[in-house]
Amino acid sequence: MAVSFEAKDKRALLNKVENPTGKNWYLLQEVRRRTEGQMERTMSSVAAYYNGKAVLITGATGFMGKVLMEKLLRSSPDVKTVYILVRPKAGQSMQERVASMLQCKVFDRVREDYPNFQEKIKPINAELIQPNLAISPEDSEELLSQVNVVFHCAATIRFDEPLKRALQLNVLGTQQLIELARQMQKLEAFIHISTAYANCNQKHIDEIIYPPPVEPKKLFGLVEWMDESIIEDITPKLIGEWPNTYAYTKALTEYLLQQEKANLNIAIIRPSIVGASWHEPFPGWIDNFNGTSGIMIAAGKGILRTMIANNDAVADLIPVDVVINLTLVAGWYTAVHRPKNMMVYNCTTGGINPFSWGEMEYHVLSTFKRNPLEQVYRTPCAQLTSNYLINWYWIAVSHKAPAMIYDLYLRLTGRKPRMMKILDRLHKNLMLLEYFTTQSWEWSSDNMNMLMGQLSPEDKKLYNFDIRQLHWSEYIENYCLGAKKYLLNEDMSGIPAAKQHLRK
Ligand SMILES: CCCCCCCCCCCCCCCCCC(=O)SCCNC(=O)CCNC(=O)[C@H](O)C(C)(C)COP(=O)(O)OP(=O)(O)OC[C@H]1O[C@@H](n2cnc3c(N)ncnc32)[C@H](O)[C@@H]1OP(=O)(O)O
Ligand SMILES: NC(=O)C1=CN([C@@H]2O[C@H](COP(=O)(O)OP(=O)(O)OC[C@H]3O[C@@H](n4cnc5c(N)ncnc54)[C@H](OP(=O)(O)O)[C@@H]3O)[C@@H](O)[C@H]2O)C=CC1
C-alpha cells in the first residue's frame, strides 16, 4: 500500500477521526505510524545530523550491518551516500551479493517508505585482510574526499577462528581502516563495534580500555613470518585468560584504537550477546544461527535436552535494534560533541534489566510448546545444569541413545543417518558457549545513560535504547517466533499441523 503524506496535515486529519473501525482502522493505523515516524524525524537532531552526510559501513552484509544500514536509510532518508565495503564471496560478485542482500526481508520497511532507497547505497569492492583493504585507487579517492562517518562492524565472530586469521581480520584489518580514516578529509566520527566480552578476564568491566597482555603490534610481525601451525600451537599460551581467539583479538583491537587514535574522533560500542530485534525493523527479526539462536532452535526441535549453564547466571542478551540505535546516536554524539577522550559504551542489559539463563530456558520452552516448530524430532524439553556429571548422564541417555536409534531407523529405511552428526556439532557449539553460560559479569553503563540524557524526547523514541522498557517474556517469545519465521522459513499457518506432529 503506497501512502504519500504530509505530516502535519495527516496528523490534523487523524485527530479528527474518532473511533475508526474495520478496514479504515488498519489504514489509519498505518498512516498514523508513518505520520508519527515522519514527525519524529523532522524534529530529531540525530536523524537530521545524518541527512546530507556520507557514511561508510564495513560488515554491511552481516547481521548487525544490515540492521544498521536499514535504520540509517529509514530514519535519515536524505543521507547523501551510504558506502558499504563488500567482498566477492562464494562465487558471487560484489554486485550480485548486494543485489540479493537488498531483497532481504529486513529491508521491507525502508523499501515501503522509500522505494528508491538503493540509490543511496554505493558498494565498494574491498577485502579487509588484503593490503590497503584491496580498495581500488579511484574508490579510495572517493572515500577520502567524501566520507563523514565510519561504522566499523566487520569482524570474524567465530570462536574457533585460527588466531592468525582472527588477528589479520579483527586487528590488522582495523589498523588498515584507521589508516584510511586518518586520510579522510571530512571525517567527523569513527565508530568501532567491539564486544562486551573483549575484557571477559575481568569480572567488573568499566567503560575504559584495558591494556592487553601483549602489544598488538608485536603480534603483527608474528602473523607475517610465523608458520600457521606454529601459531596454532602457541595460541593457548598467547590468549591466556581469554576463552577464544575472537574475544582476545577484540581486546587487542580496542587497545590498538587507543594507540592509533591521534586526532580522530573514535567511539567504541561494546554489545553483549546480540539477539533478534525487539521492535525494528520487525519484532523477532534474526538472520543467523550464532550464539543463542542456534541453541534455541535445537531446543525447539527437541534435539537439545541438556546443556551446561548456571540457571542463576545473567543471560546478557541485547536486541540488535537497541545496539544499532545506540550506535547511530553514538555516531551523532561523537561527531557533534567531539568528546576529548575516546568514549566506550558498554551496551548490556544485566545491570539494568537482568534476566537469567534459567528464565531463558523457561520462556524458550514455553514458547515452543505453544508454537511448535515443524517436523520436531522430540518434544521440546531441555534442562540447564551446572553439574557436569548430570549433564554427561543426560547426554548419554537423552541425546546419544535416541540419536543412535534414530540413525539406525534411517539406515534401515534406506536413508542417510544424520542425527549423530547434528549432535556432534551441537556438542562442539555448546562447549564453546559454556564459558559464557556459566558465569556472570557486571558492566558499568554510565556512558549509555549519559547518551540517553543527551537525547530529545523525539530522539528517545526514534532511537530507543532504553532497555528498562524491555519485557523479557514478550521479547523471547518474539525471538523464538522470529527464528521460526525468518531462520527456518516456517509459516505461522503451519502451527496446527506442527502441533499435531508434536502430539504424535
Ligand atoms: C533450553 C533453551 C535455552 C536456550 C539457551 C541458549 C543458550 C545460548 C548460549 C549463548 C551464549 C552466547 C555467548 C556469546 C557471547 C559472546 C558475544 C559476542 O561478542 S560473540 C558474537 C557472536 N559469535 C558467536 O555467537 C559465534 C559462535 N559460533 C561459532 O563460533 C561457530 O558457529 C561454532 C564454532 C560454534 C560452530 O561452527 P560450525 O560447526 O562450523 O558451524 P557453523 O556455525 O559455521 O554453521 C554451519 C552451518 O550450519 C547452520 N546452522 C548452524 N546452527 C544451525 C541450527 N541450529 N539449525 C540449522 N542450521 C544451523 C549455519 O547457518 C551454517 O550454514 P551455512 O552458512 O554453512 O549454510
Ligand atoms: N552478533 C553478536 O552477538 C555480537 C557481535 N558483535 C560485534 O558486532 C560486529 C558485527 O557482528 P555480526 O553482524 O553479528 O557479524 P556477522 O558475522 O554477521 O558479520 C560480519 C561482517 O564482517 C564482514 N567480513 C568478514 N570478513 C571480512 C573480510 N575479510 N573483508 C571484508 N568484510 C569481512 C562479513 O562480510 P561477508 O558477508 O563477506 O562475510 C560481514 O559483513 C562484529 O564486530 C562483532 O564482533 C559484538 C557483540 C556480539
Image: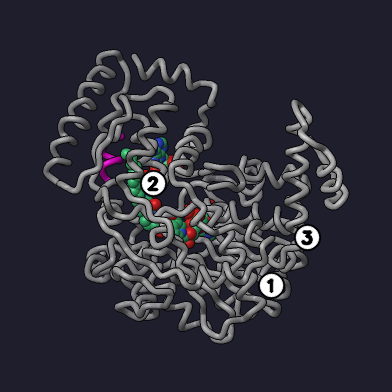
Start and end of the magenta stretch? 421-428
Q: To which quarter of the image does residue 253 belong?
A: bottom left
Q: Which quarter shows the N terminus?
A: top right
Do callouts 3 and 1 mark residues in contact (Cβ within 8 Å)? no
Residue 377 in the image, given as x and y percentages of width and height: 33, 24
Q: Amino acid at mark 1?
A: Asn
Q: Judge the density around disc 2: few (<14), some (14-19), many (≥20) Cα neighbours within 10 Å.
A: some
Residue 108 place in picture, x, y as percent: 67, 41
Q: Secondary structure at mark 2?
A: helix
Using the numbered discs, state the Cα–Cα distance from disc 3 to disc 1 in whole angstroms: 21 Å
Q: Position of residue 251 (x, y in %)?
A: 38, 71
| Residue 426 among magenta residues | yes
Which quarter of the picture shows residue 2? top right
**Disc sitting over residue 79 in the figure:** none
Is 154 above or below relative to 280?
Answer: below
The residue carrying mark 3 is 42
